[in-house]
């Protein structure tokens, strides 16, 4: 269970709860994230979303970029099945694959953009996972990773948790859980700078995503 060990695969109950309660808020935050990403994704790009969960972002990218080839990968078979069903329902040709960020089942240089949202806090070796993301990028490709910010502003966390599909009385405990268990086990700007600094990337960027409790780290693979 991921609730007991953040690096464990999501169980079916956890996948269901995440998908129904939290993912809609991530998707709302994703409007901003998708906006940030849109400028980085060419019409015909090959895109990989690592730790795609129920596939919301991968499907959003495919809907915005009809000629892009989008792949989502997740450790959890439950999440992959959920994402594939969602793709079928939306008639979007997105490929969903089960696997680990630490050992991506793709050839080197396969993607123009590799992204990941709210997943790296779960990776038992974040540096190794990010090296894998860089390996599967083509030269000149862009890595764009979003994660909860351990140093996020209370107002941004409140706004984010306010969008979870929960009855109002549960929002305060959910806010505490988000600040301690989720963001508390995530990364801060210093961690993000250290992670990016360990990668062979140029044009790197590490910053908070305004109006959200998330930060972004990004960089391009040298030509
Ligand atoms: C908080 S959810 C985020 C899901 C999705 N990106 C979103 O924004 O809604 C984290 C996801 O990362 C996945 N995950 C955890 N460890 C992973 C790993 N080592 N490799 C790939 N995915 C992993 C989990 O199964 C889960 O679906």
Image (cartoon, helix red, strand yellow):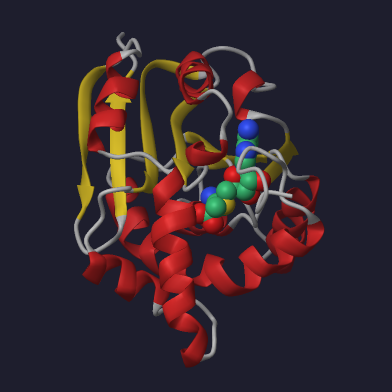
Viewer-closest of 106 and 120: 120
Residue at left offset 47%, top offset 91%: 168
Residue at left offset 77%, top offset 61%: 85
Is residue 7 rendered to the left or right of residue 193?
right
What is the x, y in percent for residue 147? 39, 45
Residue 86 vertical position relative to residue 43 in the rendered view, above or below: below
Viewer-closest of 48 and 65: 48
What is the x, y in percent for residue 167? 53, 90
Residue at left offset 23%, top offset 31%: 190
Based on the displayed image, in which of its 4 quarters is residue 16 positioned? Answer: bottom right
Q: Quadrant of ligand 1?
A: top right
Is residue 205 rendered to the left or right of residue 90?
left
Q: Residue furthest bottom?
A: 168
Is residue 104 rendered to the left or right of residue 159?
right
Based on the displayed image, in which of its 4 quarters is residue 73 positioned? Answer: top right
What is the x, y in percent for residue 72? 62, 42
What is the x, y in percent for residue 54? 65, 57
Viewer-closest of 221 and 92: 221
Residue 100 vertical position relative to residue 17 in the rendered view, above or below: above
Q: How many marks?
A: 0
Asked whether residue 34 is in view, the answer is yes
Residue at left offset 30%, top offset 58%: 213
Asked whether residue 62 is in view, the answer is no
Q: Quadrant of the C terminus?
A: top left
């Amino acid at each position: 269970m991921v609730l007991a060990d953040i690096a464990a695969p999501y169980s079916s109950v956890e996948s269901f709860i995440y998908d129904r309660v939290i993912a809609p808020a991530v998707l709302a935050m994703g409007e901003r994230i998708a906006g940030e990403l849109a400028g980085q994704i060419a019409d015909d790009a090959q895109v990989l979303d690592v730790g795609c969960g129920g596939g919301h972002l991968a499907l959003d990218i495919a809907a915005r970029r009809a000629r892009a080839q989008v792949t989502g990968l997740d450790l959890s078979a439950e999440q992959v099945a959920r994402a594939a069903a969602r793709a079928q329902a939306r008639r979007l040709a997105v490929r969903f694959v089960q696997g680990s960020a630490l050992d991506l089942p793709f050839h080197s240089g396969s993607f123009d953009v590799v992204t990941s949202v709210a997943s790296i806090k779960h990776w038992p070796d974040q540096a190794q996972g990010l090296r894998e993301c860089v390996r599967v990028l083509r030269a000149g490709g862009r890595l764009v990773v979003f994660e909860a910010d351990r140093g996020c502003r209370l107002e941004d966390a409140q706004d984010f948790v306010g969008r979870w599909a929960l009855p109002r009385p549960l929002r305060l405990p959910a806010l505490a859980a988000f600040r301690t268990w989720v963001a508390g086990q995530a990364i801060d700007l210093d961690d993000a700078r250290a992670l990016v600094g360990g990668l062979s990337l140029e044009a790197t960027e590490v910053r908070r995503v305004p109006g959200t409790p998330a930060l972004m780290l990004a960089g391009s693979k040298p030509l």
